[in-house]
Image: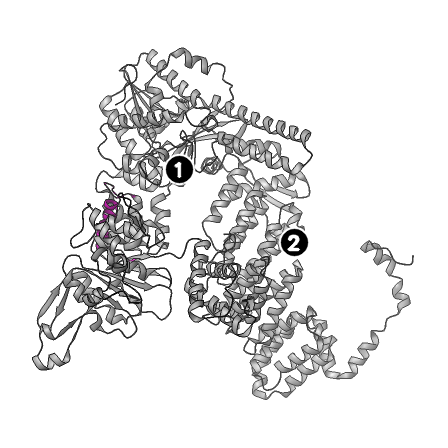
Amino acid sequence: MTETATRVKSVLREHAEQQYANELAELERVDKKQKPPSWKLSPWAVSKYILGGKLENGFEIAPKYIGKERIVEIAIATLATDRALLLLGVPGTAKTWLSEHLAAAISGDSTMIVQGTAGTPEEAIRYGWNYAKLLAEGPSLQALVPSPVMRAMSEGKIARIEELTRIPAEVQDTLITILSEKTLPIPELNEEVQANKGFNVIATANDRDRGVNDLSSALKRRFNTIVLPVPDSIEEEVDIVTRRVESIGRALELPAEAPALEEIRRVVTIFRELRNGITEDGKTKIKSPTGTMSTAEAISVITSGMALASHFGDGKMIARDIAAGINGAVVKDPIQDKIVFKEYLETVIKERDGWKDIYRSCREMS
Amino acid sequence: MPKAETDDVQVFGIRHHGPGSARSVLAALKELKPDCILVEGPPEADSLVAFVEREDMKPPVALLIYSPDNPKQAVYYPFAQFSPEWQAIRYGVNNYIPVKFMDLPMTNSMALEEQRRKEIFELIEKTLKEEDDDDDENHNDESEADEIVKTSESFHPESKDKMPSISKDPLSWLARAANVSDGERWWEQMVEQRRDTKDLFAALNEAMSGLRESLKDEPADKHDADEPYREAHMRQTIRQARKDGYKNIAVICGAWHTPALSNMPPAAEDAKLLKGLPKTKVVATWIPWTHSRLSYESGYGAGIVSPGWYQHLWDHDEKIVEKWMSKVARFLRDKDLDASSAHIIETVRLAETLAAMRGHSAAGLSELNEATKAVLCFGDDTPLKLIYKELIIGDRLGEVPAETQGTPLAKDLEAQQKSLRMKAETGEKILDLDLRKDIDRGRSHLLHRLSLLGIKWGIIEKSKRKSGTFHEVWNLRWEPEFSIALIEASVWGRTVLEACEAKAKDQADKDPSLQDLTELLDQVLLADLTNSIRYVMEQVKSVSATASDISHLMHALMPLAQIARYGNVRKTDVETVSEVIASMVARICAGLPAYCSALNDDAAQLVFESIIQVNSAISLLNEQDQLNLWYECLQKLLLDANMHGLISGRAARLLLDAKVITTDEIKRYFGLALSLAQEPGRAASFAEGFLQGSGLVLIHDVALLEIVDSWVSGLGEEQFKQILPLMRRTFSSFTPPERRQIGERIKQGQVVARKQEKSLDINHERGSLVLPTVALLLGLSLEGE
C-alpha cells in the first residue's frame, strides 16, 4: 500500500486521501477539538471535510457529500462510539463515496477495503496463508497473509467492506467476533490479533437489489444502519443524470446528439414516481415495482436510448427509443410489475399533457 | 427573579405547555408561598377554576370560551398535565390560595376580532368598488381582493408565515440568534431539559426584553393587534389584586409578556386604553382535549409538536434519556420488533455522542430519534412513524365532569333541533322523511351527522328503504347519555357540522381499509359534509392506488358508481367521485387478468359475481374510455386458455351482450370451449358462466343451442355424469318458460324453430293501434300526426 501512496500522478483515479491531501492537512492544522483515540481529525473536522465549507482562516473545503447534514453527523457519531457503520441505499446514492471519504478523514487511509462478491471467501475478511512459506517453515506469523480487516485492526484504522450483502451469509458472520470482541483469533498459531483503538468497520450494502444475502440478525445488531436517501428533488436528480449521461456518451463515442433536457426530465420523472410510489405533484399514489428504479438505471435507460437513436434512428432520441429501456427497468417480475406498470401508464402517463408519445410507445411494448 | 415595581409581585415567565417551566414554576411557588396567583387566561373562566381538583377531571382538557349566539366563534385554552398554568392553578386550589385569570376578557377580544373582520370586509369591498370605477377588467379585481385578504390575514390567528412575527413565536427568533434550526428545539435544550432552574426566570425576562426591543423595527401590521389591550388588562388585574389587599402575588404568564408586566406604566394609561372596548356575550366551559390537539394553535398561541415527550419530561426527574429509550424498546417489543437491552445501551451512547458533536449538554428528542432509527430500526422509517404516533404524540383523551356547562356543540344541536322541528324525546318515534323536501333533507343530514359522531339518535329502518331512493324511515329515540356523548364530541368542533367534518377527516386519516373508507364516504355523502367529501375521496384514491387486492377494488366500485350516478338526488357534489372511479377502473382492468389466473371453483364463483357487479357499474356510468378498457380486459379473460371456465364464459357473455363481439365469433368461442378436446369440467363451467341467469340466448340462437346439444350428446357416460350437476345448476337458473322452450326445441329439432319464427309474424295493423298509448306513456310525440 505504501508503494501506491508514493507513486506519481499517472494513476487513473487517486484515493480520497491523496486527492484531498491539502484539505486534510489544513483541517488537521486548525483542528483544536477533542479527537477520539487514533483519529486523525476530530468528529467536527471530519464533518467539515465531508460537508465542505469555509474555515475560519478562509480556507475553502470542497463539499464531498451533498445531502442531509444530519446523516453525516450520525455516521460520524456512530464511528466515534466504536459501533460499526452500515450504509444502505439503492445504487447511485453515494454509499461507497461516503465510506471512502469517512475512512480517509478519520484514518487518513481509505485503502483497507474488502470488495464483497458472491465469491468472497473467509480469508478475505480474516487471513490467508502464504502456502510456500507455510510448507517451508510451518505455521508462523510470517506465513500468514493478513486481510485488510486484520491490518486495519492492528493499525487502528477504518476497514471498509463494500457490498456486504453480496458476501455469502456464512462468510459475513465472520465479522461477528471482530465487531463484538474486537479481536481476531488465529487458532492455528494459538494467537490472536486484538484491534487497536481507532479500528472500526464501514460496510455498504444495497437494500433493494435482488439476489442479496440478508444480514443475519446477530450481525445486523452490531451495526448502526443509515439509509442514504435518493436525491431529494427532481432538479438534483436530473442534474446527476445529465452529467453522467454526457460522460458515458463521450466514453462510448455515441454519435447521437445529446438528449434534450426535457427527455431526461421525463425519464427521471417516471423513475422517481415509480420509486417513490407517488406522482411528482404529490396528488396520486401509485404502486412501486419490485425493481430498484435507481438513478443509475435511469442513466442506463438514456444511454441505451441514445445508442438506439444513433444506430437505428436519425440520431435524435425519441420516445420509442427509451420506451424499451423503461419497460426493461420497471418490469423485473413478469407478472406483478407488468400490472404495476400498466396501472401507472393508464392512470398517470395517459393523462399527462404532451406525454402521449411515451404513453403510446410504452403501451406497445408491454 | 424579575421583580415588579414593588416587592409584592413576582412575575414568572413560562412557555405554555413546557414541562420544564411547569417544574420551575411549581418549585418557585412552593418557595414563594404567595397569597394570590394570577394566571394568563380568560377571566370568564374564574368560576371554573375549582373544577381542576375534581377526581373526574383529567387533563388534557381545555377551557372553551364561545359566543352563545355564534358557537363558531370560540377560543380554546388547552391544558396538559405538564402545562405550567395547570400546575399553578392546581397548586393554588390545593392550598386554598385564590387563583384568577388575568388576560383580556374574551368578551372584549372576541368583539375586537369581529370588529376587525368587518373592517377588512369593508376594505375589500371598498377596493373592489374603486377598481370597478378605474378598470373594467374583473379578473384583476379578484386577485387583488385575494391579496388584501392575504395581507390582512396576518391579523388572523391562523395565518402561517414562513418566519412568524416576533410576537407570535419569539422562540424561533431566539433560536435563530443561537443558530438552532427551530424554536422548539432551542427551548427544549435551553429550558425544558435543564434541571437547575435558578435564575431561569431572570434570564428569560432579559431575553424577551431584548426581543421586544427589536420588535419596534417590525412593520406594524405584524404585531398582534390585541397585545396592548391584553397586557394593559393584565397589569390592571395585578393592580386590582394589590388593591384587594394581597401582599404576595405570583403572576404566571407567557415569557413574552414578562417585560410588560415587570415595568408598570402609570395606571391611568392602561385604564384609558381599556375604556370603551366593544363587548360581546360569551360563555366559558371545560371540555375534554387530546394530546394530538395540543399541537394546534389555540388561545395560548402556537402548539407543541411532541406532547408525549413532554409528558415524559414531566413524569421523570432523572435518567430521562435512558427511561425514554426503555419505553421505546418496550413499545417495539410489543410490536414484535427486536429490541434488547444492548440495543438501548447503544442507542443511548449514539444519542449522547451526537449531542456532544452538536454541542448540546444532553441528548434531545431529535438525537434520540436519529439514534433509534440507526440502531433499533436498522435505518427503516416505518417503526419510527409508529413511535411518533404512539409515544411522541402519545395520544390521550382528557375527561371533564359531566356537570360542566353546555358546550357550543350542544347549543348548536339545540338550535338545529328547533329549526328542524325535531324534539329530543326519550320515547320511540318513527320519522318518515321525503328527501325531496328541504326540511326533511335537513333532518336526514342532521341524523346522519349525529350518528357519525357516535350519537345514534335515529336508527334507519333498512326494510323500508325499498320504497324509493328519496325516502328514509328513521326510528328516533333520545337517550340521556347522549348529552355526555355531546361533551365528548365537542373535542371535534363547535358545531355539529364542524365536528362531523373533523371526525370524518380523522377517521379517513387512520388509514383504514378500502372497504371502511367507501363506507365512510357513503356516510359522509349521506351527512352532506361537503368539505370532507373531497378529503375522503382523496384518501379512497390513495388507498385504492396501493391496494394490492383487486377484489376490494371491485367491491368498492359499485357503491362509488351509484354515488356518481344517483348522488345528485341528494344534491351532493360528485365530480370527485368520477375521477376516483376512472382510476379504479383502470387499476381493475390492469390487474384482473393476473388476479384471475389459477382460481379454484370457490374463488372463481366470487370473482364471477364481482365481475358481474363491475360490469354493471361500468355500464351504469357509460363512459366510453372506461368501457373500452373493460372490454379489452374481458377479451383477455376470454382468450386465456388457462382461465377458469366460469370466468371466460361470463366474459364471452358480457362481450356478446355489449355487442363487442358478433354472434358468429361467439359461436366460434363457444364451439372451441365446448369441443370434445376440452376437459369436460371446464367446458361445463364455461357454459355455466356463459348461460347462468338467462337462457334466452339459447332460444334465440339455434346454432348455439346446437353446439350445446351436440356437446352433451357427444359425451361419454363417465363424462356425462361428471358434468350433469353443473349443467343442472346452470339450467335451473333459467325461468321455467325458458326451460320449457329449450326442451321443446331440442325434442323437436329444427321444426320448432321454424314454427317459432312463423309465430313471430307481426300484424302491423293491429300493432299500430297501441302506439298512441305507448307514446303517451313515454311522453313522445308520434311522427306524422
Given this view, does label 2 or label 1 mark the residue nearer the observer?
1
In the image, the segment drawn in magenta is B337-364
The residue under the point 25% across, 39% down is B316
Q: Chain of mark 2?
A: B
Judging by the rendered image, the residue that carries numbered circle 1 is: B294
What main secondary structure does the magenta stretch of the protein show?
helix
Which image quadrant is residue B747 in? bottom right
As displayed, is residue B266 above or below residue B31?
above
Residue B612 in the image: state x and y as whole percent: 61, 65
The amino acid type, in three-letter code, at marker 1 is Leu
Q: Which residue is identified by label 2?
A: B565
Q: Is residue B157 left or right of residue B438?
A: left
From the top left corner, tell me how far across and down residue B717 is, in percent.
58, 88
Name the residue rendered at 33%, 42% in the picture: B308
Q: Amino acid at mark 2?
A: Arg
- On whether residue B435 falls in the magenta region, the answer is no
Q: Is residue B297 above or below residue B244?
A: below
Residue B359: say if magenta. Answer: yes
Determine which quarter of the picture holds residue B210: top left
Residue B232 placement, left or right of B156? left
Is there any visible trace of residue B354 in the rendered image?
yes
The residue at the point 66 percent across, 44 percent down is B435
List x then y, in percent, for residue B397: 39, 40
Q: Is residue B650 visible?
A: no
Whether B509 is drawn above or below B17: the answer is below
